[in-house]
Amino acid sequence: MEIVLVRHAEPEWAKDGLAIDNPPLTDRGREQARRLADRLSHEAFDQVFVSPMVRAQQTAEPILEVLGVDAPTEPWLEELRMPDWTGTPSAEVDELFRQAPYRPIEEHWAGITGGESFKDFHVRVTEGVEATLAPLGVTPYRDEGPLWEIDDESRRALFVAHAGTNATIIGHLLGIDPVPWEWERFVMFHASFSVLRPHPIGGGWTFSLFRLGDTEHLPDGMRTR
């Protein structure tokens, strides 16, 4: 079971100086998504899953079109939920994020006040990915470390989601202890994709991070984070 994780293209986080809570893509983001779709147009997937957020749905549209498939929307793929800042001056939100890395560690686990805690986010994503992969023949292998039972290693699944969601999936499937800044240790630019491939170990399977944040389909001027 090969797993491909797409991060959404560039969103319009602010307009007229005000923050947008669930933003659409920018014009550049739509072009990023189109180029990513072209990159994936010759691929084949047994299943595709998409986050409910507008930026992920709009990124998925050209991909699903070139693949000629439909995809279920999976609520568990949503990014770490922030407070609703719609209408808040974007400069205030930007300043909050500039200060966020310097908070005490326990505050990182608790998340942003008014939003989802990272602990809850981690449970939501890890339980979601396990429940989604189980019908595809991927389940935990006994209790012997971060190994998996995989019925058919040739199958492929595509997820269109977010930096934090995808980073949490990667860490979980690799068996790495979580931290509340997953998106900083697994960096993925907009409209990039990452690939996890199975490798047989000790009677089970381990996932290998074969590719992280691939943006070869984007020229330098279109690579945004």
Image (cartoon, grey):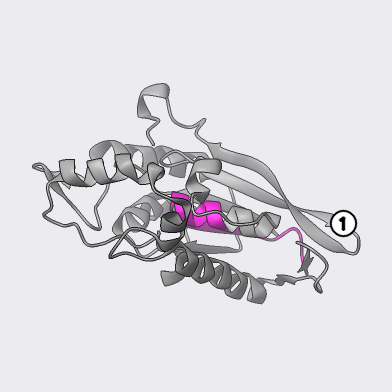
- Does residue 201 appear to the left or right of 195 in the view shown? right
User: Mark 1 is on which residue type?
Assistant: Ile
- Image quarter in which the C terminus is found: top left
Give residue 188's position: percent from left, percent from top.
Answer: 49, 41
The answer to whether 219 is drawn above or below residue 95 in the figure is above
Question: Does the magenta-highlighted stretch encompass residue 108?
Answer: no
Find the residue positioned furthest to the top: 220
Residue under pointer 1? 201
* Residue visible at 49% across and 66% down in the picture: 119
Q: Is residue 183 visible?
A: yes
* Residue visible at 87% across and 57% down in the picture: 201
**Label 1 Cα neighbours within 10 Å, binned few <14 / some 14-19 / many ≥20:** few
Give residue 213's position: percent from left, percent from top.
Answer: 53, 39
- Does residue 179 appear to the left or right of 33 in the view shown? right
Magenta residues, start to end: 152-168
Q: Quadrant of residue 151?
A: bottom right
Question: Does the magenta-highlighted stretch encompass residue 160?
Answer: yes
The answer to whether 78 is drawn above or below residue 42 in the figure is below
Q: Quadrant of residue 202?
A: bottom right
Q: Quadrant of residue 75?
A: bottom left
* Residue visible at 49% across and 42% down in the picture: 184
* Residue visible at 17% across and 40% down in the picture: 91
Give residue 29's position: percent from left, percent from top.
Answer: 31, 40
Find the residue positioned furthest to the right: 202
The answer to whether 167 is drawn above or below residue 94 in the figure is below
